Amino acid sequence: METHPMKWLTTLAALFGLALFAAGCSEQQQLENAQEELQEERDETAQTAIEAQEDGVITADEAGEIREEQGETIEQAGQVAAEAGDVIEQETDH
């Protein structure tokens, strides 16, 4: 599977920015941010799949890109679950 250095750098920069932003946010706001990011990942996965299917044939590279996008979506879903857990924990502590 071919890696895309610019995509990795962009992703890392976005995650770093999100981490800095999240440091000053409430647990609820962090959950909302994670949910928005999950929706963006879902959209990117869908767009990648649509583009791969446009010519009727999905190449091995395109299949790899789809799997990579699906992995990012799953990873973000895990982040949403973790943030939801933090919100529940915060609410039960109060």
Image (cartoon, rainbow, N blue to C red):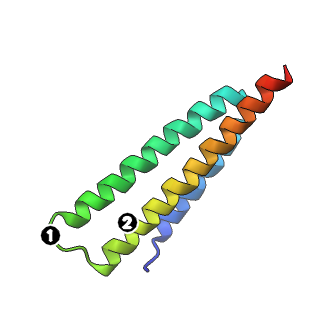
Q: Position of residue 8 (x, y in %)?
A: 53, 64
Count of residue discs: 2
Residue in front for this viewpoint, 39 or 14:
39
Identify the residue shown where x is 50% and y is 44%: 38
Residue beneath disc 1: 56
Relative to residue 77, is residue 93 depicted above or below?
A: above
Residue in front for this viewpoint, 30 or 74:
74
- Looking at the rendering, in which quadrant would you find the C terminus? top right
Residue beneath disc 2: 66
Residue in front for this viewpoint, 25 or 57:
57
Neighbourhood count class around disc 1 (C-alpha, 10 Å): few under 14, some 14–19, many 20 upward:
few
Residue type at mark 2 is Ile
- Could you tell which of marks 1 and 2 lies nearer the N-terminus? 1
Identify the residue shown where x is 71% and y is 38%: 85
Q: Position of residue 71 (x, y in %)?
A: 50, 62
Relative to residue 5, is residue 75 depicted above or below?
A: above
Q: Is residue 22 left or right of residue 91?
A: left
Q: Residue furthest left?
A: 55
Dot 1: what SS?
Answer: loop
Q: Is residue 40 left or right of residue 31?
A: left
Q: Residue furthest top?
A: 94
- Looking at the rendering, in which quadrant would you find the N terminus? bottom left
The reply to whether the C-beta atoms of the residues labelled 1 and 2 are less than 8 Å apart is: no
Q: Is residue 25 visible?
A: no
Residue type at mark 1 is Gly
Relative to residue 12, is residue 30 depicted above or below?
A: above
Identify the residue shown where x is 45% and y is 71%: 4
Identify the residue shown where x is 77% and y is 23%: 91
Q: Position of residue 57 (x, y in %)?
A: 18, 74
Q: Residue furthest front?
A: 92
